[in-house]
Image (cartoon, rainbow, N blue to C red):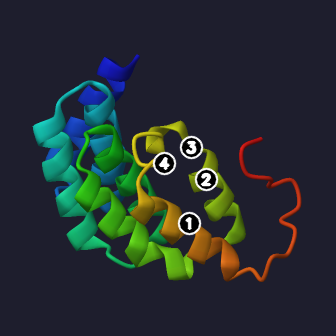
Amino acid sequence: MLQKGSVQDVQWFAAEPDHSGAIGHGDGILALLGDRHRAHEWASRASLLEPDNIQLQANLVCAWAVTDDTVAALDALERIAPKMSAELLVWMENDNDLDSLRSLPRFTEIMRATRARFGGQSLPGCEPGK
């Protein structure tokens, strides 16, 4: 299934090399398939094309984390944290693609500061770790 999706994204990318959605989706697929080098190239390109697209940047955080590019993942997470919605915050707190980052003090601090922006308010249906 992933192989088929990867082929379609590669075809889409070939037809529209500046389509950040296709690139952003494709980098995640490449990361899951273990093609770390291409995943990193695609993620870097997508990040340059749409640095203010929070959802795209969140997907890139995941791709970089999966490919063990900790610095790029944390840098991107830090950039989007001030603009993150409560829903995206909870998603990132629970997304298993980010498991490789959870033990890092920088990750913990970014997530703590982001959660603090919401003033300790309860986020309905959004309890971390559940």
Which of the marked residues, 3 or 1, is nearer the chain's N terminus? 3
Which residue bears the numbered disc 1?
111
Q: Residue at x 42, y 53 (%)?
A: 59
Percent coordinates x, y for residue 64 in the rendering = 29, 49
Residue under label 3: 95
Identified at 11% across, 40% down, the residue is 37
Q: Nearer the viewer, mark 3 or mark 1?
A: 1
Q: Amino acid at mark 2?
A: Glu
Query: How far from the left and from the top, in percent, is residue 61?
Result: 38, 55
Badge 4 or badge 2: first in the primary sequence: 2
The image quadrant that residue 67 belongs to is: top left
| Label 2–label 1 contact, CB within 8 A | yes
Q: Residue at x 56, y 43 (%)?
A: 95
SS class of the residue under badge 2?
helix
- Classify the position of the C terminus by image quarter: top right
Name the side, left or right, on which 19 lies relative to 81: left
How far apart in space, not on screen, are marks 3 and 4 (Cα)?
Answer: 10 Å
Name above or below for residue 66 compared with residue 128.
Answer: above
Rendered-image quadrant of the N terminus: top left
Distance, label 1 to label 4, CA atoms, is 10 Å
Q: Mark 3 is on which residue type? A: Asp
Whichever of labels 1 and 4 marks the residue nearer the N terminus, that label is: 4
Pick whichever, 48 or 112, lies toward us: 112
| Cα distance between the residues tagged 2 and 3 | 6 Å
Q: Nearer the viewer, mark 3 or mark 4?
A: 4
Q: Residue at x 68, y 78 (%)?
A: 116
- The three-letter code of the residue at mark 1 reads Met
Sequence-wise, the earlier of marks 3 and 4 is 3
The circle drawn on residue 102 is 4
